[in-house]
Amino acid sequence: MFHDHPKKSLRQWVVTAVCVALCVVVLAFGAMRLYGLVTRDMSDQAATALRQAVLDAAVQCYAVEGKYPESLDVLEEEYGVQINHNRFIVTYDVFASNQLPDVTVLEK
């Protein structure tokens, strides 16, 4: 059986197109926002992992040598710590050779 469908007016086509475009914009904005949140979380995790690696190497040095290293260079040269200096700023503050150093990692 054949049914005659009424034709859509130009106004109905415009309203439909605007609704579809609006949905696409909202979905794109949501995807960009989610991407930004995930990227920031990954950067935070990388900085935390680097800080923990520096502290672990310092503790290993203390166990082997009986003192914490005087500088971050010692950890990089003798204990295999790898730091991406183009991405991170690492501060390594030593108060005394028998106290755990204060380590701060910031992303550039």
Image (cartoon, rainbow, N blue to C red):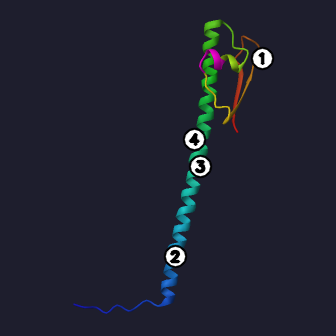
Q: Position of residue 22 (x, y in %)?
A: 55, 72
Q: Which residue bears the numbered disc 2? A: 19
Calculate the distance from the C-alpha at mark 1 to the C-alpha at mark 4.
31 Å
- Verify CB contact (< 8 Å) between mark 1 and mark 2: no
Q: Which mark is residue 48?
A: none
- The amino acid sitting under disc 2 is Cys
For marks 3 and 1 on the same chain, the one whose residue lies earlier in the sequence: 3
Where is mark 1, residue-wise? Answer: 95
Q: How many marks?
A: 4
Is disc 2 placed on a helix, strand or loop? helix
The residue shown at (59%, 30%) is 49
Does the segment drawn in magenta span residue 108?
no
Find the distance from the CA under tag 3 to the CA under tag 1.
37 Å
Q: Is residue 79 magenta?
A: yes
Q: Measured along the vertical axis of the image, is residue 75 above or below residue 28? A: above
- The circle on residue 37 is 3
Q: Hey, what amino acid is under mark 1?
A: Phe
